[in-house]
Image (cartoon, rainbow, N blue to C red):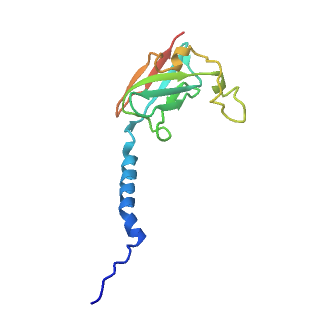
Amino acid sequence: MAEHVLAPEPRRHRLAPIWAVALLVGLTGCSDRHSVAPVEGKVIYRNAPLKFGSVSFQPEVGPRATGRIQPDGTFRLSTYGEHDGAILGRHRVSIVCAEHQNPETRSPGGDSEGRYSRSLIPEKYTFPETSGFEAEVKESNQPFTFELSD
């Protein structure tokens, strides 16, 4: 009588279910991006456009959006990619304008954003909790205008 000997299963077949689960987990993680909408606006300080700095929109949940203030006071926000906007929903807004951001005095070696320097606007605008500015981002937005006062 012939005996049937079971050969060990090839390693790749034993690992297939593990790879399938890992792939499914990885794919579901890719959909965590929130919907965004284009956001642009202008910052005014002392009745004139703020010539440089940055604007940040901090949502209740999700990643914040930031944008550089241009010499005419305008900004466009980016969250995941350049100028894609901010996630939909309610945001607290902060505005930073500091010496190190001034393109006229910045060193030619690059932007030293991480370095602390004196704020050129009232510091309350630097933090979303104290700026007093809020914004509601919808799928279609009119430009936002933020007027700063001393």
Q: Residue at x 42, y 69 (%)?
A: 11
Total marks shown come to: 0
In the foreground, 47 or 89: 89
Instruction: Give the percent coordinates (x, y) of residue 7.
Output: 37, 78
18 over 86 or under it: above or below: below
**The C terminus, quarter of image:** top right
52 over 5 or under it: above or below: above
Q: Residue at x 58, y 25 (%)?
A: 53
Q: Residue at x 38, y 59 (%)?
A: 18
43 over 113 or under it: above or below: above
In the foreground, 30 or 25: 25
In the foreground, 9 or 69: 9
Instruction: Give the percent coordinates (x, y) of residue 99.
Output: 65, 22
Q: Is residue 35 left or right of residue 78?
A: left
In this view, the residue farthest toward the right is 108
Instruction: Give the percent coordinates (x, y) of residue 118.
Output: 64, 18
Q: Quadrant of residue 22?
A: bottom left
**The N terminus, quarter of image:** bottom left
In the foreground, 60 or 77: 60
6 over 139 or under it: above or below: below
Q: Is residue 96 left or right of residue 93?
A: right
In this view, the residue farthest toward the front is 1
Q: Quadrant of residue 51?
A: top right
Q: Is residue 148 left or right of residue 114?
A: left
Q: Residue at x 65, y 27 (%)?
A: 115
